[in-house]
Image (cartoon, coloured by chain):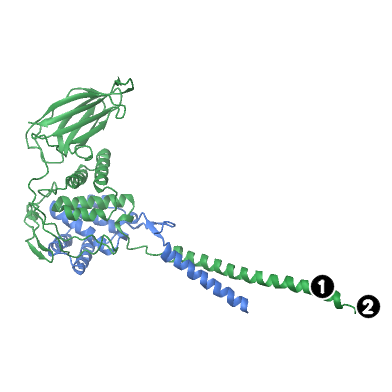
Amino acid sequence: MARRIGFIIAILVGLAAGLYYGWVVNPVNYVDTTIDTLRPDYQTDYVLMVAEAYHANGDLDLAARRLAQFGDDEPVLITRQAHLLARQYGYSAGDLVLLDEMALAFQTWTPQPAYAATLTPAGAASTPGTADQGAGP
Amino acid sequence: MKAPGSRPNVEYVEPRRTARGRGRSSGAYWFVLTGLLVGAVAGLLYAWLVSPARFVETAPYSLRPESKDQYRLMIAAAYGATGDLGRAQARLTLLRDPSPEQALAVQAQRLVAGQSSYDDARLLALLAIAISEGRPLAAPVSGSTTPASLSALTPPPVETSSGTVHITPSGETPVATFTPVGREPTAAATLTAAPTATRPPQPTRAPTATPGSPFVLDEREELCDPQQPALLQVYVRDAAGTPVPGVGVVITWSDGDDEFFTGLVPKVDLGYADFAMEEGVIYALRLGAASLTSIGGVPALPVGELAAEACTTEDGMSSLSGWKLVFTQK
């Protein structure tokens, strides 16, 4: 009986040690990730960059292609979501205006025929990164 | 006379007890070690495979190379639109490139070499040049299609916690409000407005050639350098002798042509561009077919035939000759 208890305790201690090592000491370090896996604040900034470029060149199809990095969601939804997050993060009013401008434009946007052909495949955008173990901190 | 079984039994049993005792002690250790091992393996499998730490919410520096290129291009495109060099540099730090301007220049060169997008290469090169010079654009780079309706959409000056941010076509945008994003303790931060200083006055903009003024070939020198065999080096200067980045150079030969731009190797010179020639091929070169900056109207200027030929240095070393061409605007 004592052996079994000792064995179970040893397993638990080993499990705890393994989890501590795997989560804290040397966690999985993902490399080769894609833009759609970025943290929301980075994603929001990416959308802002698209909006800044759109404000200058007025090319909505190009903006849509750039937003296709986030997958299959409609550009207008991506932009609106970014706008909400931008307000939450305290972006300047000028930045919010740019996001709002692009969101408004996407509301009435009809993709050009060439757009679908040049759209980044959703699978490519959502392909998860690869894990690089052993490259911990 | 010994009692039967007394002494022999004792002698027989004691060693066995001793052996059993050793076996129990050793077995107990193995149980502990085995348990620890099994638990540790199970824990690692769970932590690394079943429920690994943070797969989503990655940072830009962990992006795969092509996604980094896309991210870098967007930074350059946003910079071309706003002229906000401080914000562009803050964004570039998120990619953790050892040398951001070098990464931009290399990507621009790749695009030019692959003939995929001169517009994108131009944006990347302009940002690389601005970082190298430490001076932002004097005016945003408009795309080829800028509807008048969008020009009118210039937002009015807005008040932020960091001060007034003017987004104007002239690009006089005080360095604004972007504190590099991140939950990391260092770079930082969140995309919240942060106290920033107004950009110091910029006395002059990046040197650009005067529109319409022709370039003349000031210097044409054949080189014999074993370190740089068959290298065609082009230097472009404005009338004041200042290197001019972003000038298109078109090179043609019997069955092909190529185009490259000055300024993509800022470590050498902002007005520098080079091209690796092949032995036995005769090249012709001219400037101004395309340019990163507004020097439209520059007439093509043939510079004669150029070729990489066998040569010998003063030290007697054999190499292939290269050329150095210096153009100056008149």
Residue nearer the viewer, B73 or B161: B161
Residue B23 picture location, percent across and down: 69, 70
**Residue B325 coordinates in the image, percent (x, y):** 18, 28
The structure residue drawn at horizontal position 20% and vertical position 35%, both measured from the top left corner, is B272
- Outermost residue on the front side: it is B1
Figure quadrant of the N terminus of chain B: bottom right
Between marks 2 and 1 in the image, the one whose residue lies nearer the viewer? 2
Residue at mark 2: B1
- Picture coordinates of residue A49, whole percent (x, y): 20, 56
- Which of pointers 2 and 1 lies earlier in the amino acid sequence? 2
Question: Is B192 on the left-hand or right-hand side of B163?
Answer: right
For the residue marked with disc 2, what is the amino acid?
A: Met
Which SS class for mark 1? helix
Q: Are marks 2 and 1 in contact (CB under 8 Å)?
A: no
Q: Quadrant of residue A41?
A: bottom left
B229 to the left or right of B164? right
- In the shown orientation, is residue B201 left or right of residue B220? left
Q: Chain of mark 2?
A: B
Q: Kindly indicate which chain is depicted in green in the rendered structure.
A: B
Identify the residue at image location x=13%, y=27%. Answer: B217
Is B140 above or below relative to B39? Answer: above
**Tint applied to chain A in the drawing:** blue
Q: For residue B12, what is the image quadrant?
A: bottom right
* Amino acid residing under circle 1: Tyr
Q: Which residue is mark 1?
A: B12
